[in-house]
């Protein structure tokens, strides 16, 4: 299976207009059986997106995050049980670097993964190093610790999990990581998870656009893309979808 994930972050889009632009420009792209195109709007826009995309034969809905807690006195949070009230939500991003910067530790990310799996929602787990870590030569060690924090979870062997390798220094900068660097990290992630008997699809994210997506997708161990900025434009995102 291949995946194309849109992370709209805290942007308010004109959803009807975005869907129109996407549908008018995507032409004939791979069907849902081989390519899952998942749009993650902000929490408030999720119900509206579900309603407006209901006719689309391509678009699916995901969430940008979830609470690690069960429903209760946690102001401002949304639980996995709330997400599961929407049967259309099959995916949820966790561990995005912007959430990690806001306080999500590896332990919290693991709790979020567990909550999602309990609700049969597939976690899209973001991992990736800072520029400082990369330049200090500590990248593999850093990635290993992030992967280690959840990969001993027995339930992962029987549930689907998606990993998004997103080097922090490539997110939102307009400068994607070099192919050789992406390959090294993805191969490392794959090999590490295989030692735990986890078969995971691995995506790349970080300044992906219509122009660079084809080359990135040609890498054999890359199963898809997580796209921020370039997903805000329905036409550009449709062009990326055509490259699968
Ligand atoms: C992201 O935030 O997950 C991301 C990949 O953003 P961008 O595509 O803008 O770098």
Image: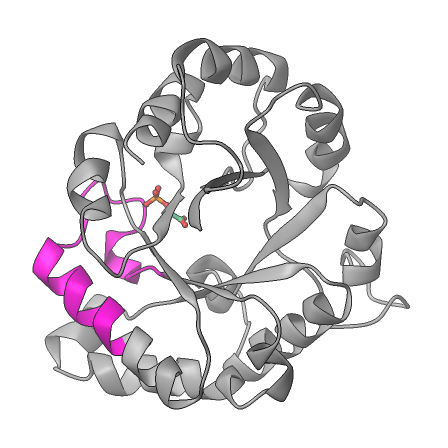
Residue ranking furthest to the front: 33
Q: Quadrant of the C terminus?
A: top left
Determine the image quadrant of residue 154.
bottom right
Residue at screen point 56% across, 39% down: 10
Residue at screen point 67% across, 50% down: 90
Residue 84 among magenta residues: no
Percent position (x, y) of residue 121?
A: 68, 59
Lateral position of residue 233 relative to residue 119, left or right: left
Percent position (x, y) of residue 124?
A: 52, 60
User: Could you say which is closer to the camera, residue 37 or residue 134?
Assistant: 37
Residue at screen point 32% across, 30% down: 240
Segment tinted magenta in the rendering: 165-188
Determine the image quadrant of residue 217.
top left
Lateral position of residue 164 relative to residue 31, left or right: left
Percent position (x, y) of residue 223?
A: 35, 54
Lateral position of residue 61 relative to residue 133, left or right: right
Residue at screen point 66% across, 23% down: 53
């Amino acid at each position: 299976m291949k995946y194309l994930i849109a992370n709209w972050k805290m942007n308010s889009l004109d959803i009807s207009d975005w869907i129109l632009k996407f549908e008018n420009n995507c032409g004939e792209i791979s069907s849902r059986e081989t390519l899952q195109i998942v749009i993650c709007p902000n929490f408030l826009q999720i119900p509206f997106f579900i309603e407006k995309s209901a006719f689309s034969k391509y678009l699916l809905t995901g969430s940008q995050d979830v609470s690690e807690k069960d429903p209760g006195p946690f102001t401002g949070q949304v639980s996995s049980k709330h997400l599961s009230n929407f049967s259309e939500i099959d995916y949820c991003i966790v561990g995005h670097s912007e959430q990690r910067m806001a306080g999500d530790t590896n332990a919290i990310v693991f709790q979020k993964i567990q909550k999602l799996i309990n609700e049969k929602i597939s976690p899209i787990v973001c991992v990736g190093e800072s520029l400082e870590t990369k330049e200090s030569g500590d990248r593999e060690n850093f990635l290993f610790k992030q992967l280690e924090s959840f990969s001993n979870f027995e339930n992962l062997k029987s549930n689907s999990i998606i990993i998004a390798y997103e080097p922090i220094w490539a997110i939102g900068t307009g400068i994607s990581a070099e192919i050789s660097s992406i390959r090294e990290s993805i191969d490392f992630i794959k090999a590490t998870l295989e030692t735990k008997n986890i078969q995971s699809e691995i995506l790349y994210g970080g300044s992906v656009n219509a122009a660079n997506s084809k080359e990135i997708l040609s890498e054999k161990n890359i199963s898809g893309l997580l796209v921020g900025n370039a997903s805000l434009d329905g036409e550009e995102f449709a062009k990326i979808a055509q490259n699968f």
